Image: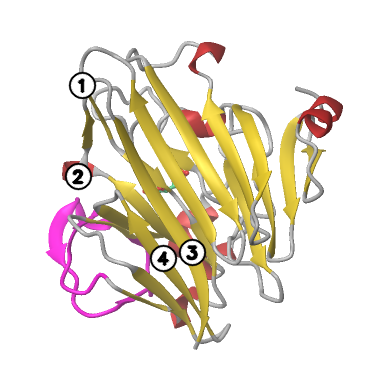
Amino acid sequence: MDLQTLNEQFTNENVNFSNRGDDFTIVDIHNEHADASICLQGAQVISWTPAGEMPVIWTSDTAYYQHGKSVRGGVPICWPWFGAHAKDDTLPAHGFVRTQNWNLQSVQSLQDGSTVLMFGFDFSTGTYPWDSRSELTIKIIIGKRLEMYLQTQNNDEQAFNITEALHTYFRVSDVRQVTIAGLEDCRYLDKVDAFKEKKQNGKITINSEVDRVYLDTSNECIIEDSGLQRKIVIAKSGSLSTVVWNPWEQKTRLMKDMEPQDYLDMLCVETANAATNAITVNAGEAHTMSVAYALERF
Ligand code: TA6
């Protein structure tokens, strides 16, 4: 859908459409509470900045904005699998919906001044390694908080299993200075140590590559950033896994869509259902995973 059609179909004083690169369409939202941008590809939030605050979401300055390539940063939607595909390593990591265009279904302004956008994945736009009749939608609320509701609807006759994540990249002052509270005593799979199962001792600090899937936890997490004198509160529902990732120096050097020092400015705390927390969606039923981000002063 071209920019003019989008602007006509979704007339809203707080929403504008622009292109980045060739025809990579971005939805720009500006309301009294915050500014944000969302790519039609992947329905991927790539920025959220509450009024008067530093940006909360990190996106690489060298990210690709090319159809079919994942955008480094923001909130990639990993579905219908998180991480490597369980059986077929020729399939892309983190599923296939983050690199395809979603349909913008509606734009609404709420009484409180927030902006609500609904996106739906269009399974008819290609052949995907997924043969269950389903619907996938995400509701995104841009306001003093950033809220996302990812819903999977099973329209088939049989149940199916999914793993999923809202793979959020947060901006931090210096990843070596932040702590993550909320996962104390939780079990996790340590991807940088052959997926060994371990137990979190105290708050999480980052001083090397960290890639952990915390299991069986619906806890609220808090990124405590003394450098920016702020806390990012991450409150979730419908999610039993939390993934914490920072690629650190060596992995970052291998990534063409990150500058060598970028690992210091970002930290992923991902709301997920991964590994043994896979979700079974029964025929005719729906599952929603949601998360809300809010800022607090130190
Ligand atoms: O969520 C952490 C992780 O699974 C890491 O292992 C790393 O692969 C990261 O996701 C980024 O994956 P991507 O496919 O976006 O490069």
Dot 2 lies on which element? helix
Separation (CA) of disc 4 from disc 1? 30 Å
Q: Residue at x 22, y 80 (%)?
A: 202
Foreground: disc 2 or disc 4: 4
Q: Which of marks 3 and 4 is nearer the N terminus?
A: 4
Callout 1, which amino acid? Ala
Which residue, given by chain and number where applicable, does mark 3 sit on?
Answer: 293
Separation (CA) of disc 2 from disc 3? 22 Å
Mark 1 Cβ inside 8 Å of ligand 1: no
Q: Which residue is drawn at 59% across and 60% down?
A: 58
Dot 4 lies on which element? strand
Which residue, given by chain and number where applicable, does mark 1 sit on?
Answer: 159
Callout 2, which amino acid? Asn
Direction front: furthest residue: 111
171 with respect to 193 (left or right): right
Q: Can you see residue 175?
A: yes
Residue 31, x across and y down, in percent: 74, 59
> Which quadrant of the structure image shows residue 283?
top left
Dot 1 lies on which element? loop
Dot 3 lies on which element? strand
Mark 2 closeness class: few <14, some 14–19, many ≥20 residues within 10 Å: some
Separation (CA) of disc 2 from disc 4? 19 Å
Q: Earlier in the sequence, mark 2 or mark 1?
A: 1
**Camera-side residue of 99 and 174:** 99
Which residue, given by chain and number where applicable, does mark 2 sit on?
Answer: 277
Note whether 267 is above or below 23 in the view shown.
below
Which residue, given by chain and number where applicable, does mark 4 sit on?
Answer: 234
